[in-house]
Image (spheres, coloured by chain):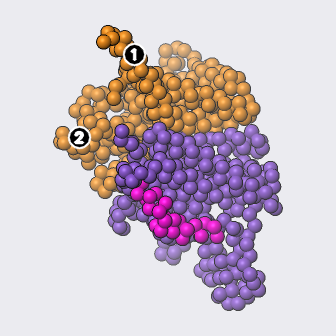
Amino acid sequence: MDYATLLQVLDSTIRLATPLLLACLAGLYSERAGIFDIGLEGKMLAAAFLSAAVAFVTGSVWLGLLAGIAASMFLSAIHGLASITFRGNQLISGVAINFLASGLTVLIAQAWFSQGGRTPSLTGAGRFTPWEWPFAEAIIPVPVVGPLYGELLSGHTAIVYLALAMVPISWYVLFRTRFGLRLRAVGENPAAVDTAGVSVVGLRFAAVAICGVLCGVAGAYLATSLQAGFVKEMTAGRGYIALAALIFAKWRPWYALYACLLFGFLQAVALRFQNLDLGLFVVPVEFMDALPYILTVVILAGFVGKAIPPRAGGEPYIKER
Amino acid sequence: MDKMPRWADVLLVPVISLLLAAILSAMVILGIGENPLEALGYMVEGALGSSNGWSYTLYYATNFIFTGLAVAIAFHASLFNIGGEGQATLGGLGVALVCLALPWPHWTLALPAAIVGGAAFGAAWALIPAYLQAKRGSHIVITTIMFNYIAFALIIYLLNNGLKPVGQMESSSARFPDGAHLPTLEDMAALIGIEAFQRAPANISLFLALLAAYGVWVLLWRTPLGFEIRAFGKSEPAGRYAGISPTKIIMITMLISGGLAGLMAVNTVMGEAERLVNNSVQNAGFIGIAVALMGRSHPLGILIAGLLFGFLVQGGAELAFWTSIPTELIIVIQALVILFTGALDNMVRMPVEALFNRRRLAQSAARTPAE
């Protein structure tokens, strides 16, 4: 593999890791607050559809982004209502949300655009445009460093940089602010937080809302940046890969970045090479597709360090009277 | 806290939940500019209006009974098996391998072997998640989701490498031998001289599903193992105190659950397609979740819920054929059923409970004389 190919693969690694990272961080907030969320997939899908639809109709990708966030927040609200207010089963609620998004997006897309459950292709201002870094064009001829700067680092859309920036921001918010401390506490021992006079319900709703915003951005990125428009089931299991990355990262922001880059890299390699010939044997593309899931099972099995979820995760909090 | 009467728990709450799901489904249909009553008409006509429609309805119902039972038995042990889709996929592989292994002379020989193959492969796919849950405490929901995706990749790989006959373009296995052909409802109706269910997929597996439902009922409510499963599911510490081994219960329950999901393949792969194709499960594993929730994890409830979803899926296909409403409508309905009978159960239960409590208080107040 020569340098140019490597750069290409790494470039698409960054692009493919971005939605995973956003969704993974979304899940991080929610699960750190004790709300399991297997509905990341559905929220991304809903956001992808509505952002593409609104971006197409209005011609503005930013309005599309807002609409995507709104769609994701709506599903988050359902999840919050079911799992916080009515203390229902968070996993079942997540499953319901995934199916709701999977069905409604196609149904509404068909009703609005009559193109077999997709939105029309987005062009021009309907998509996010790449940000060229200063001197990117000029520096490319410089050997090694030039393409690294000009092609790999420069030339992604705003959301890619936003996603990367969200890693230190999330770390700071969760581990260096009072809100973050309380949010993590509510996922470990909600009764203690309640005793301290802080609202468990309020904190958990805040976490679920942040999760909705980030999933919304992730979905909008898929439809308006990575691709040009919404197609049926376009998330293609990314919500579950993000979930896997979250476990892989043991619910920590920086590790989430590494996990998502790794899984993004696997996707990029699978996309670029199909069946990977390693000389001795051929790695089939199906194996590359399944690798994130296999790795997660291995991690979950506890062979490579134990992944311990937040202690109060998945349990509704019942206030004592 | 006071309990409400049993009939309210078993009937009233689920019926209200379903009504809410139905009302919202109707609003969705209205929202996309179609008439819900007209849509229902198409669905009833398409699914129940002819013996052919009935046959499709029963064919789908057979799948959902199997996957519904699979989810339900795990629910009884407080385990959430989302892996029905993957387990049924592997069950399909097991059934296909059995059917292709020998030139079966007659279906009476092929069927028992296929049952063993499907159940064994389905159970095997639940084995690792079960072991990881029992021994290492890895959450079964996450592992079964991961195993779904691993199963999809595995089947695509096997269909393209090995199972596909040389020279064939389409990625599917070879056709099963004629001796592995299961009697369809049409064949069975012809035996007693009735011409019905023409060119339709429902087959003898339907009776296998009914048998499985009865078997699950006997297991759960009439055997010591079933008692242990339910006791463990109600309270793990209490079960442990009573000498029930969590490892044993988790393993056995998940193996049965995976086996039931795998049995679905007898209906689809052996009974209908007669070869292994990609995506032979078609969401049935996931619909099983809705069926189990709606059926309150009771075999009788699952039979009813399975039939309802069989009607929905077949009716939805007809609806998509005659109108511009895509089949995804069924996924929305499925989601709403899961939402209202599962996640938002308390939303209905709390007010109903409060209503009964208030009535009881009022009655007892009326009975005790004022002091």
Measuring from the top left, give residue B105's x and y in whole percent.
42, 35
Label the purple chain with its letter. A
Which residue of the protein is positioned furthest toward the front in this rendering? Answer: B371
For image coordinates 38% across by 62% down, the residue present is A307
Q: Is residue B157 left or right of residue B70?
A: right
Chain name for mark 2:
B
Q: Residue A297 lies in magenta, yes or no?
A: no
**Amino acid type indicated by mark 2:** Gly
Chain name for mark 1:
B
Q: Are marks 2 and 1 in contact (CB under 8 Å)?
A: no
Measuring from the top left, give residue A184's x and y in whole percent.
43, 59
Residue at label 1?
Answer: B362
Q: Nearer the viewer, mark 2 or mark 1?
A: 1
Mark 1, other Cα within 10 Å: few <14 / some 14–19 / many ≥20? few
Label the orange chain with its letter. B
Question: Between disc 2 and disc 1, whose residue precedes?
Answer: 2
Q: Residue A180 lies in magenta, yes or no?
A: yes
For image coordinates 65% across by 48% down, the residue present is A71
Mark sitting on residue B239: 2
Measuring from the top left, give residue B345's x and y in whole percent.
47, 33
The C terminus of chain B sits in image quarter? top left
Is A126 drawn above or below residue B222 in the view shown? Answer: below
Residues drawn in magenta: A161-186
